[in-house]
Amino acid sequence: MIAATLLCLIVGISDGDTLTARCGEPGQYEQVKVRLQGIDAPERKQPFGERARQALAELTFQKEAELRCNKLDRYKRHVCSVWVKPDEAPEPVKTLDAGLAMVTQGMAWWYRSYAREQSPQERGQYEFAEQEAKARRAGLWRDPEPIAPWEWRQKILGKK
Protein backbone atom coordinates (compact mmCIF):
# COMPACT_ATOMS: atom_id res chain seq x y z
CA MET A 1 0.00 0.00 0.00
CA ILE A 2 1.24 3.43 -0.90
CA ALA A 3 0.15 6.47 1.11
CA ALA A 4 -3.48 6.18 2.14
CA THR A 5 -5.89 7.58 4.70
CA LEU A 6 -8.41 5.17 6.19
CA LEU A 7 -11.33 5.81 8.54
CA CYS A 8 -11.55 2.92 10.99
CA LEU A 9 -12.72 1.71 14.37
CA ILE A 10 -9.97 0.50 16.70
CA VAL A 11 -10.99 -3.00 17.82
CA GLY A 12 -7.85 -4.48 19.37
CA ILE A 13 -4.60 -3.51 21.07
CA SER A 14 -1.69 -5.95 20.78
CA ASP A 15 0.94 -3.91 22.60
CA GLY A 16 2.05 -0.30 23.02
CA ASP A 17 2.68 0.28 19.32
CA THR A 18 0.44 -2.22 17.49
CA LEU A 19 -3.33 -2.29 17.15
CA THR A 20 -6.10 -3.77 15.04
CA ALA A 21 -8.58 -1.58 13.19
CA ARG A 22 -11.83 -2.42 11.41
CA CYS A 23 -12.00 -0.33 8.28
CA GLY A 24 -14.63 0.11 5.59
CA GLU A 25 -18.37 0.21 5.29
CA PRO A 26 -20.79 -2.02 7.24
CA GLY A 27 -20.90 -5.42 5.61
CA GLN A 28 -17.58 -4.78 3.87
CA TYR A 29 -15.23 -4.44 6.83
CA GLU A 30 -11.57 -5.27 6.58
CA GLN A 31 -9.44 -6.00 9.66
CA VAL A 32 -6.15 -4.10 9.42
CA LYS A 33 -3.13 -4.69 11.65
CA VAL A 34 -1.42 -1.35 12.31
CA ARG A 35 2.06 -0.51 13.57
CA LEU A 36 2.19 3.06 14.89
CA GLN A 37 4.59 5.14 12.85
CA GLY A 38 7.43 6.92 14.65
CA ILE A 39 7.44 5.03 17.96
CA ASP A 40 8.68 1.83 19.57
CA ALA A 41 7.01 0.80 22.82
CA PRO A 42 8.25 -1.76 25.34
CA GLU A 43 7.44 -5.36 24.45
CA ARG A 44 4.66 -6.93 26.52
CA LYS A 45 7.08 -8.99 28.65
CA GLN A 46 9.46 -6.07 29.04
CA PRO A 47 9.20 -3.63 31.99
CA PHE A 48 6.40 -1.13 31.25
CA GLY A 49 5.17 -3.31 28.37
CA GLU A 50 1.74 -3.98 29.82
CA ARG A 51 1.38 -0.36 30.96
CA ALA A 52 2.22 0.80 27.44
CA ARG A 53 -0.46 -1.52 26.01
CA GLN A 54 -2.99 -0.14 28.50
CA ALA A 55 -2.01 3.45 27.66
CA LEU A 56 -2.55 2.86 23.94
CA ALA A 57 -5.89 1.21 24.73
CA GLU A 58 -6.99 4.24 26.76
CA LEU A 59 -6.08 6.52 23.87
CA THR A 60 -7.60 4.51 21.02
CA PHE A 61 -9.69 1.43 21.88
CA GLN A 62 -13.25 1.49 20.51
CA LYS A 63 -12.66 4.92 19.00
CA GLU A 64 -13.02 6.00 15.42
CA ALA A 65 -9.59 6.78 14.03
CA GLU A 66 -8.05 8.28 10.95
CA LEU A 67 -5.12 6.13 9.86
CA ARG A 68 -2.53 7.91 7.75
CA CYS A 69 -0.51 5.03 6.35
CA ASN A 70 2.66 5.13 4.31
CA LYS A 71 3.92 1.54 3.99
CA LEU A 72 3.71 -2.11 5.01
CA ASP A 73 6.38 -3.43 7.36
CA ARG A 74 8.12 -6.80 7.09
CA TYR A 75 5.28 -8.40 9.10
CA LYS A 76 2.70 -7.02 6.60
CA ARG A 77 1.36 -4.51 9.14
CA HIS A 78 0.28 -1.11 7.87
CA VAL A 79 2.61 1.57 9.28
CA CYS A 80 0.42 4.55 10.10
CA SER A 81 0.01 7.58 12.24
CA VAL A 82 -3.23 7.06 14.17
CA TRP A 83 -5.41 10.09 14.83
CA VAL A 84 -8.35 10.06 17.26
CA LYS A 85 -10.60 12.60 18.92
CA PRO A 86 -9.28 13.55 22.37
CA ASP A 87 -11.74 12.60 25.13
CA GLU A 88 -12.09 16.22 26.24
CA ALA A 89 -12.69 17.65 22.75
CA PRO A 90 -16.29 18.81 22.14
CA GLU A 91 -16.08 18.41 18.36
CA PRO A 92 -15.62 15.05 16.62
CA VAL A 93 -12.33 16.18 15.08
CA LYS A 94 -9.46 13.70 15.19
CA THR A 95 -6.62 15.93 16.41
CA LEU A 96 -4.72 13.59 18.75
CA ASP A 97 -1.73 11.74 17.27
CA ALA A 98 -1.71 8.53 19.35
CA GLY A 99 1.99 7.88 18.70
CA LEU A 100 3.01 11.34 19.83
CA ALA A 101 0.76 10.96 22.89
CA MET A 102 2.49 7.67 23.78
CA VAL A 103 5.90 9.36 23.64
CA THR A 104 4.59 12.35 25.64
CA GLN A 105 3.28 10.01 28.37
CA GLY A 106 6.61 8.22 28.55
CA MET A 107 5.10 4.98 27.27
CA ALA A 108 7.20 4.74 24.09
CA TRP A 109 10.46 5.84 22.54
CA TRP A 110 10.66 8.04 19.50
CA TYR A 111 11.94 5.53 16.92
CA ARG A 112 14.86 7.50 15.49
CA SER A 113 15.79 4.71 13.07
CA TYR A 114 12.66 5.60 11.10
CA ALA A 115 12.78 9.38 11.58
CA ARG A 116 13.36 9.88 7.85
CA GLU A 117 9.78 8.66 7.30
CA GLN A 118 8.48 11.61 9.32
CA SER A 119 8.18 15.22 8.25
CA PRO A 120 10.67 17.67 9.80
CA GLN A 121 7.81 19.01 11.95
CA GLU A 122 6.92 15.52 13.22
CA ARG A 123 10.56 14.75 13.98
CA GLY A 124 10.77 17.93 16.05
CA GLN A 125 7.55 17.17 17.92
CA TYR A 126 8.53 13.58 18.71
CA GLU A 127 12.07 14.49 19.76
CA PHE A 128 10.78 17.28 22.01
CA ALA A 129 8.09 15.01 23.52
CA GLU A 130 10.69 12.37 24.37
CA GLN A 131 13.06 14.92 25.94
CA GLU A 132 10.20 16.33 28.03
CA ALA A 133 9.05 12.87 29.15
CA LYS A 134 12.62 12.04 30.21
CA ALA A 135 12.93 15.33 32.10
CA ARG A 136 9.62 14.67 33.91
CA ARG A 137 10.59 11.03 34.55
CA ALA A 138 7.22 10.09 33.07
CA GLY A 139 6.25 6.47 32.49
CA LEU A 140 9.16 4.24 31.53
CA TRP A 141 11.60 7.07 32.25
CA ARG A 142 11.04 6.39 35.99
CA ASP A 143 13.19 3.31 35.50
CA PRO A 144 16.82 4.23 36.34
CA GLU A 145 18.04 2.29 33.26
CA PRO A 146 15.22 1.84 30.75
CA ILE A 147 16.07 -0.58 27.96
CA ALA A 148 14.91 0.43 24.50
CA PRO A 149 12.72 -2.24 22.88
CA TRP A 150 15.11 -2.73 19.94
CA GLU A 151 17.92 -3.46 22.42
CA TRP A 152 15.69 -5.72 24.52
CA ARG A 153 14.57 -7.71 21.45
CA GLN A 154 18.17 -8.19 20.36
CA LYS A 155 19.33 -9.20 23.84
CA ILE A 156 16.38 -11.41 24.86
CA LEU A 157 15.04 -12.66 21.56
CA GLY A 158 18.13 -12.38 19.40
CA LYS A 159 16.33 -10.22 16.82
CA LYS A 160 15.59 -6.59 16.00
Image: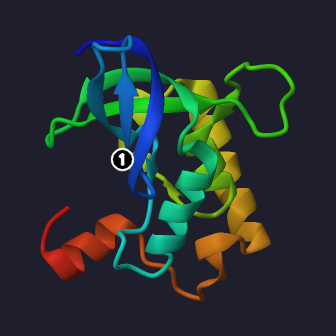
Q: Can you tell which quarter of the image residue 2 is in?
A: top left
In-front residue for pair 109/13: 13
Image quadrant for the C terminus? bottom left
Query: Farthest residue in the bottom direction?
Result: 144
Secondary structure of the residue carrying numbered label 1: helix
Please identify the quarter of the rendering in which residue 44 is found: bottom left
Residue 87 percent across, percent down from the top left: 77, 40
Picture coordinates of residue 34, whole percent (x, y): 34, 37
- Is 121 above or below relative to 152? above
Please provide percent x and percent y for residue 100. 61, 43
Looking at the image, residue 67 sits to the left or right of residue 140; the answer is left
Q: Within the image, what quadrant is residue 83 found in?
A: top right
Q: Of the residues shown, which amino acid type is indicated by label 1? A: Ser
Say which of 73 and 130 sits in front: 73
Residue drawn where x is 53% and y is 24% of the image: 119
- How many circles with numbers are drawn on the protein? 1
Left or right side of 97 for 8? left
Q: Residue 145: percent from the left, percent from the top? A: 52, 86
Which residue is identified by label 1?
113
- Image height check: is 129 above or below 91? below
Given residues 84 and 143, the one toward you in this image is 84
Check the image and report above or below for 100 versus 104: above
As displayed, is residue 28 above or below residue 12?
A: above
Front one among 83 and 71: 83
Residue at 22% from the left image edge and 16% from the top image edge? 1
The residue that appears at 75% across and 59% down in the rendered structure is 132
The residue under the point 16% across, 35% down is 76
Mark 1 crowdedness (10 Å alpha carbons): few <14, some 14-19, many ≥20? few
